[in-house]
Image (cartoon, helix red, strand yellow):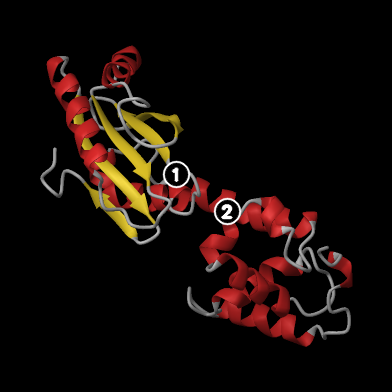
Amino acid sequence: MPQAEENVGKHAGAGHRARLRERLLGGGAEALADYEVLEYLLFAAIRQGDTKPVAKALLKRFGSLAGVLNADPAALKQVDGIGETSAAALKSVAIAARRMARSEVSDKPVLGSWQSLLDYLAIDMAHLTVERVRILYLDARNRLINDHHLGDGSIDEAAIHPREVIRRAMDLGASALILVHNHPSGSPEPSRADIQITQRIAEAGRLLGITVHDHVIIGREGHVSLRAKGLI
């Protein structure tokens, strides 16, 4: 059973917390190591004591800072020292990061803010444990008008119907779209099914004046653009 939050390391001094706060406020993005960032995030939930063992246990369990922040709350609470308050504090940071990233692509031409779009997609999808398919529908100025969660599961024509994808674009008044999905395996390299379904959707779009700008595959190891590979 996870140890109660208020009982973790009651006798550790406040001096360490003060020093971390000073480094955080006085330094740049790399002022704190990943485990120290987690330590600081846990201070609000664990009011007294040493949060370092809990932070290091989280990194060991989930592999990285991003892995911790994207973990399911029930999984977080399986780590000694993490209760509901701590899990909520960590999830709030993940939500804030997603909203900040999304704000960088909202109301802007997506093709002119490509790196911001990739950052947003990576934050939102790179650490998912299921394969998720999204369609980003764009207006005539290439601004995002709808971020549609098409579904979870393998990307193939049994799950994705090209005509339905294009019909939704027409219903929304979209002029273009970008396909997005993730590979939970970590590698973003496209499969044969990824390439085939993209080409079918692009062909269906051409008949009705809907442009398929790209198909972006997100993985923990990076991303792949099918257009950049010459596959669209």
Question: Which residue corresponds to mark 1?
Answer: 102
Above or below — where is 80 with respect to 103?
below
Q: Residue at x 52, y 53 (%)?
A: 97
Say left or right for 19 vs 50. left
Foreground of the two, 11 or 139 = 11
Q: Residues within 10 Å of mark 2 (few under 14, many from 20)?
A: some
Pinpoint residue 56: horizontal percent, then vertical percent: 64, 76
Foreground of the two, 140 or 35 = 35
Q: Residue at x 50, y 49 (%)?
A: 129
Question: Which residue corresponds to mark 2?
Answer: 94
Q: Residue at x 28, y 44 (%)?
A: 216
Say left or right for 92 vs 98. right
**Residue type at mark 1?**
Arg
Above or below — where is 133 with respect to 130?
above
Q: Closer to us: mark 2 or mark 1?
A: 2
Q: Which secondary structure, mark 1?
A: helix
**Residue type at mark 2?**
Ala
The quadrant of the rendering that contains the N terminus is: bottom right
